[in-house]
Image (cartoon, rainbow, N blue to C red):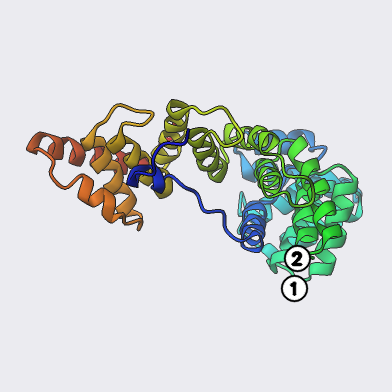
Amino acid sequence: MRPRCTPAWCRLAWRTPAWRTLVAALAVVAGHGAVAAPTEAPDLAFGAFQRGRYRDAFSAATQRVEKDSGDAAAMALLGELTADGLGIAPDLKKAAEWFALAAARGDRNAAYSLAMMALQGRGVPKDKARAKSLLEQAAKAGQPSAAYNLGLMALEDNTPDGDVRGAQLIRKGADAGVPEAEFAYAMLLRAGKGMPLDKEMAGQFMARAARDRYEAAEIEYAIMLFNGDGVAKDEAAAAKLFLRSATGGNPIAQNRLAILYVSGRGVTTDLAEAAAWNLLAKHAGRDDPWLDSATANLTPEQREKAQGLVRQRLSSYQLGITPP
């Protein structure tokens, strides 16, 4: 039987945004840092790139192109270095030119990178039709993120056929291990959009995205575990996932974890920990009057502990310490 809806229980909910809003958010995430490594990397150039010797990589790739005007992999690498300002001043327009040359010679990752630039208007005029054509080229060549983004574009049609096509394309990205696609496909399964509703399969794909450290999936899967929604109920496992995201600085996870520490669900009750996580969430702009009230009467020792935890965790964010 579902537990009585106490304030802590009621607040452990994740309101799924309207699907159109989710698609827009995912598209932004997918486009960020979309420049991919070449399909067949130039030997010395890409070796230098992997070691962080970006000037050497740029020099070696340039020499490759000078010797062979058809070296698509070298051109794609030059596009990546130029787009990110690695070993050379950043120049999105020039990066787009390199990607275009590489894409014309069949490099699937260059086609994908240029598509995302065209979709966002970065370095080239914003052109959705061109972006779609490039994504189709990249997806046909097996670029999984391209298939995922084509799926998002199909969903934007907001038609039954578009939903089915979008789900199929996103599934391709998910099967290839693209975390955003795993998360999106799980959300489609939960909504029954483009396919029959299937909460159990949604749980499987959400778990995969969470294991791949996709932040939204970590939180969503934690709530699924806590509620036993499509997966076996496991409050302790949910708390661990909240902790991982909270330690990484996510204010939603910090808020949920604070609630668990107040209620003793999945963790041992600890008001100092609850106060610390609540303060961190507030620091990030997520206020919660219920938690403020629940942690208002700490003992001096609890308050001192909470303040120490806050200082320690804020310091870890500044140092860029990766959560376990």
- The image quarter containing residue 236 is top left
Q: Where is the C terminus found, in terms of image quarters?
A: top left
Mark 2 surroundings: few (<14), some (14-19) or many (≥20) residues within 10 A = many
Q: Decide if residue 120 is on the left or right side of residue 147.
A: left
Count of labels shown?
2
Left/right placement of residue 81 relative to residue 256 reads right
Q: Residue at the location (71% across, 39% down)?
A: 198
When the figure is inspected, residue 147 is found, relative to residue 20, above or below; the finding is above
Q: Earlier in the sequence, mark 2 or mark 1?
A: 2
Q: Residue at x 34, y 50 (%)?
A: 281
Image location of residue 157, percent across then percent down: 79, 65
Task: Name the residue carrying label 1.
Answer: 125
Going by the numbered disc 2, the residue's amino acid type is Ala
Identify which amino acid the numbered label 1 is placed on: Pro
286 left or right, relative to 226? left
* Residue 68 in the image, given as x and y percentages of width and height: 90, 46
Asked if the residue under mark 1 is in contact with the one under mark 2, i.e. CB atoms within 8 Å, the reply is: yes
Find residue 254 and report its horizontal and vertical position in percent. Answer: 37, 43
Which residue does the image show at 13% across and 38% down from the upper left? 304
Residue placed furthest toward the bottom? 125
Question: What separation in Å lies between label 2 and label 1 (alpha carbons)?
Answer: 6 Å
Describe the element under mark 2 as helix, strand or loop: helix
Q: Nearer the viewer, residue 28 or 189?
A: 189
Residue at the (79%, 68%) spot, across then down = 128
Q: Which residue is mark 2?
A: 118
From this viewpoint, is residue 250 visible? no
Q: Is residue 138 visible?
A: yes
Q: Which mark is residue 149?
A: none
